[in-house]
Image (cartoon, rainbow, N blue to C red):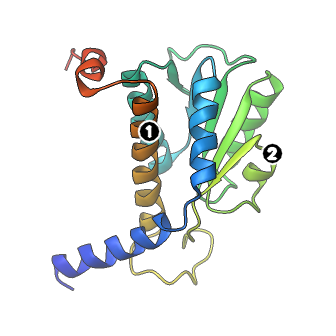
Amino acid sequence: MRLSEWIQLDLAEVNAILAQLSEAEAAALAQAILDARRVYVMGLGRSGFLLRMFAMRLMQIGLQAHVVGDATTPAIEMGDLLIALSGSGRTESVLLMARKAKYYGARVLAITSSAATPLAEMADLVVVVPAGSVKTDVTIPTRLPLANALEQAMAIYLDCIGAMLAEQRGENNVAMLRRHANLE
């Protein structure tokens, strides 16, 4: 296939996922972030990269956000929120960190592809991004590698949550740019 055909295939798969997202879950996610004293994010691989971008956006909006595992991440406590992203909902290290966060009194919000996963079952709040992944089911009908469509849908979803939060907090690009990294 030519590049333009791959792009159209990719966009069609991502759009099919995004069309199924819940407005109520998005509102609950945004409210959980606004209610939290601090937000922590946890994911591995490409999911981890997505959450690092999201934590950066939360910081630019003026919220306290931390990436689990970074050397400067403070102890999680009651009143904090852990956002744990795992497409499969079965990534052992993500499950372990979610359990630890709950042990220390934090709320856990899971972002995963199904409500019927260990991560979703243990979480206080769940956002389902309804898409399959060949990493968990090789019969998923996709021509894209592994969980590409799911990960891209999650990236767009988190970017839009960031935009919603910025609007709710009255933040604009001028204000956010003042918080943008300047040691680059």
Residue at the image position 40 percent from the left and 32 percent from the top: 167
Q: Which residue is mark 1?
A: 164
In the rendering, which numbered label is found on residue 122? 2
Q: Nearest the camera: 75 or 18?
A: 18
Residue at the image position 64 percent from the left and 32 percent from the top: 32
Amino acid type, residue under disc 2 in the picture: Met
Amino acid type, residue under disc 1 in the picture: Met
Q: Secondary structure at mark 1?
A: helix
User: Residue 106 at what x, y percent from top left?
Assistant: 74, 25
The total of numbered circles placed on residues is 2
Q: Left or right: where does residue 122 sit relative to residue 139?
A: right
Residue at the image position 29 percent from the left and 26 percent from the top: 172
C-alpha separation, residue under disc 1 versus residue under disc 2: 26 Å
Q: Nearest the camera: 63 or 87?
A: 63
In the rendering, which numbered label is found on residue 130? none
Q: Left or right: where does residue 79 sit relative to residue 64?
A: right
88, above or below 123, in the image = below
Q: Quadrant of the N terminus?
A: bottom left
Q: Left or right: where does residue 142 sit relative to residue 22?
A: left
